[in-house]
Image: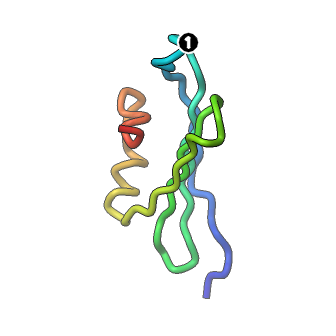
Amino acid sequence: MRLAVELIVSRTYPFIDSEALAERQARDTLFRMPDGSFLLHLSNDRTADDDRVVWIGTRAALIWLNAGPEEFGMEWQ
């Protein structure tokens, strides 16, 4: 039986803040939970109030893992 949360991958990428028109950094982190489900944590360097936590299925986790750099940040929309 698995008892620990597993960090699968974390990636950082730049984005343009539409309010300040400045380049910022975002971080997406994928975790695998003990029951086999996946948790995607989305954050940026602007404010902790913008952090998001999304539960995703296995198929969505595989798609997210295989996304190219031009697709990074699509979960924010």
Q: Is residue 60 above or below residue 14?
A: below
Q: Mark 1 is on which residue type?
A: Ala
The image position of residue 13, as x and y in percent, is: 54, 28
Q: Is residue 70 left or right of residue 26?
A: left
Q: In which quadrant will I find the N terminus?
A: bottom right
Name which quarter of the figure residue 24 lies in: top right
Q: For numbered disc 1, what is the local secondary structure?
A: strand
Name which quarter of the figure residue 20 lies in: top right
Q: Furthest-top residue in view?
A: 21
The image position of residue 19, as x and y in percent, is: 49, 18
Q: Disc 1 marks which residue? A: 22
Instruction: Identify which residue, 30 or 54, lies in the foreground.
Output: 54
Q: Is residue 60 left or right of residue 5?
A: left
Name which quarter of the figure residue 2 lies in: bottom right
Q: Is residue 3 above or below residue 72?
A: below
Instruction: Identify which residue, 17 or 6, lies in the foreground.
Output: 17
Instruction: Identify which residue, 77 or 12, lies in the foreground.
Output: 77
User: Image point 60% across, 26% down: which residue?
Assistant: 25
The image position of residue 32, as x and y in percent, is: 54, 66
User: Image point 58% across, 33% down: which residue?
Assistant: 12
Q: Is residue 2 above or below residue 16?
A: below
Disc tally is 1
User: Image point 43% across, 35% down: which residue?
Assistant: 73
Q: Is residue 45 above or below residue 41?
A: above
Q: In which quadrant will I find the C terminus?
A: top left
* Classed neighbour count for the residue bearing mark 1: other residues with Cα under 10 Å, few (<14), some (14–19), many (≥20): few
Q: Furthest-bottom residue in view?
A: 1
**What colour scheme does the image use?**
rainbow
